[in-house]
């Protein structure tokens, strides 16, 4: 990973950056701030690009964010975004069971992280998404944190602790990408 990728088809230099992490780490806040600063930035953790699917507990290799359900990217829509060569730099944020299918298309994978108590507090206070407020959802989030975050850490080429201000976290993202 790192640097720009030359797309064979068009010869255009493009860089793709995935910002990932557990619920409450600040992915949506960071991606919206990048968009506000004029960057091509897409939050995949929304109904347009992701959906809940029913899963059998025995078929899942890890705890899911919600009992009997998992959050997955709408693959055709995500692929369309990643194939778009109109911008030389694209940020996407999200975390989903099927994101491994897209990992090879990213030049950088940045993991946002924070301690469990910070995540629990943020989930309880956030207003843009109700997920994680109910005790059973918070329990699921903590279970996923223990099992999935270490896997994300292995995928990432950089990790940013999000206990700082939003401006500090965005600056760290931009510093890593540049």
Image (cartoon, helix red, strand yellow):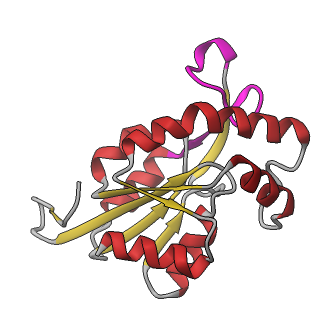
Visible residue check, residue 70:
no
Outermost residue toward the top in this view? 58
Left or right of residue 35, residue 139 in this image: right
Outermost residue toward the right in this view? 134
Task: Choose between 80 and 22: the one closer to the eye.
Answer: 22
Asked if 163 appears above or below 1 in the picture, the reply is below
Left or right of residue 99, residue 54 in this image: right
Q: Residue at x 31, y 59 (%)?
A: 83
| Region of the chain picked out in magenta, as a range | 56-74
In the rendering, at what x and y percent does residue 162 appear? 59, 64
> Does the magenta-highlighted stretch encompass residue 72?
yes
In the rendering, at what x and y percent does residue 15 appear? 27, 67
Q: Residue at x 63, y 66 (%)?
A: 163
Task: Choose between 27 and 35: the one closer to the eye.
Answer: 27
Q: Quadrant of residue 63?
A: top right
Asked if 59 appears above or below 161 in the picture, the reply is above
**Image quadrant containing the C terminus:** bottom left
In the rendering, at what x and y percent does residue 1 appear? 23, 54
Asked if 88 appears above or below 145 in the picture, the reply is below
Visible residue check, residue 9:
yes
Task: Choose between 2 and 175: the one closer to the eye.
Answer: 175
> Does the magenta-highlighted stretch encompass residue 90?
no
Q: Residue at x 82, y 39 (%)?
A: 137
Q: Residue at x 55, y 20 (%)?
A: 61
In the rendering, at what x and y percent does residue 64 appear? 67, 31
Outermost residue toward the bottom in this view? 37
């Amino acid at each position: 990973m790192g640097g720009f990728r030359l797309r064979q088809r068009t010869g255009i230099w493009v860089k793709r950056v995935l910002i990932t992490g557990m619920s409450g780490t600040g992915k949506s806040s960071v991606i919206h701030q990048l968009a506000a600063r004029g960057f091509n930035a897409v939050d995949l953790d929304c109904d347009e690009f992701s959906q809940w699917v029913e899963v059998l507990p025995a078929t899942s290799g890890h705890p899911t964010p919600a009992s009997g359900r998992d959050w997955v990217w709408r693959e055709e829509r995500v692929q369309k975004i990643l194939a778009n060569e109109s911008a030389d730099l694209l940020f996407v944020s999200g975390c989903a069971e099927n994101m491994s299918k897209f990992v090879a298309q990213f030049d950088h994978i940045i993991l946002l992280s924070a301690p469990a108590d910070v995540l629990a507090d943020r989930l309880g206070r956030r207003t843009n998404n109700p997920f994680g407020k109910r005790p059973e959802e918070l329990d699921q989030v903590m279970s996923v944190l223990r099992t999935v975050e270490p896997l994300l850490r292995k995928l990432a080429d950089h990790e940013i602790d999000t206990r700082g201000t939003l401006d500090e976290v965005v600056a760290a993202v931009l510093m890593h990408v540049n």
